[in-house]
Amino acid sequence: MIFITGGTGLIGSHLLVELTKENNHITAIYRDSKKIKTVRQVFDFYLGKESERCFSLIKWVVCDILNSVELEEAMKNHSVVYHCAATVSFKRKDYTKMMRTNRTGTEHIVNLCLDLNVEKLCYVSSTAAVGNKDIPSDVEITEKGVWEKTDETSGYSISKYSAEKEVWRGIEEGLNAVIVNPSVVIGAGDWNESSLVIFRTIENGLKFYSPGANAFVDARDVAKIMIELVQTDITNERFLCIGENLSFQSLFIAIADHLGKKRPKHKVSPLLMGIAWRLATFWAAITLRSPAITKSSARSAFNVSKFSNRKIKEAIKFEFTPIEKAVENAVAYRNFERRS
């Protein structure tokens, strides 16, 4: 039996699709039942007539990973665990929530994997937990990058690095585990959440682009890599999951083109971005809503980060989907969702 946390998220939903295609029986925990509807739509999008049969292989259990008693009851009698659940935010007010969900939640998962003699754990970390100390911006970061906390380190990065340390602690105590570190994930999912928000922003009309760059990956690729790593003898390793390193301008243009929208053509300056995040924070305080732009996200828009995918490609001979195809797939899902 397979146990999955975060099954209603972007990576988790794609993982469920891939696992059920192989007729695996799965227990997936959730907190918000409304998000299960999105997962079902993702199944319909990818699997068509096989959707209902594959979806029926999932046993949905309401459970909070911060409740260790509740979690233990749900995890019993499972041989493989995929831990995808996480809180992603760049807002300062969400720091405590992220540390609880990402670090403490992972601590609970690791402890129970050890106590229940789980055969293998696959943990979804992030490139945010991979260090780039003393690495020039034109050099690709690898799994060996040294992580160091600075004044500019985001709360999300701290929480994911701390969570990953819990997995490494479990490995030292005898746990059989692998870690994947995806970059910015693109796939079929809710455009109001995670990295897919940029699609909605561009659809609504975006005139500006930032001069930064980052790594991106197709959600389908991350799911396939996770499954393959669990099925191999590979253990006690971490793997960057990187489709392509792209400038934000190139990504925004690809999204705009597939949406049939005007391309963002004005490069935003650090001064303008600084004003924007301050105004967003001020407006959020007045309206009692979360700011659309934070200081942390504004800073990352100007960073140039490049990551290597050599290790995973050599380990399992994996070939990544071009990001252009990932964008096309995300837009196709949005159109499918609107027709449903």
Image (cartoon, rainbow, N blue to C red):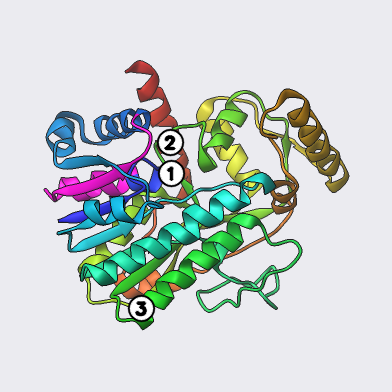
Residue 252: image location, x then y, percent: 61, 39
Q: Earlier in the sequence, mark 2 or mark 3?
A: 3
Could you say which quadrant of the image residue 110 lies in? Answer: bottom left
Q: How packed is label 1: few (under 14 Cα within 10 Å), some, or many (20 or more)?
A: many
Disc 1 is placed on an element classified as helix
Q: Which amino acid does label 1 sit on?
A: Ala
Residue carrying label 3: 171
Q: Do the residues labelled 1 and 2 touch (CB within 8 Å)?
A: yes
Can see residue 202? yes
Residue carrying label 1: 326
Q: Earlier in the sequence, mark 3 or mark 1?
A: 3
Q: What residue type is labelled 3?
A: Ile
Q: Nearer the viewer, mark 2 or mark 3?
A: 3
Residue 161 is left or right of residue 47, and the answer is right
Can see residue 242? no
Q: Nearer the viewer, mark 3 or mark 1?
A: 3
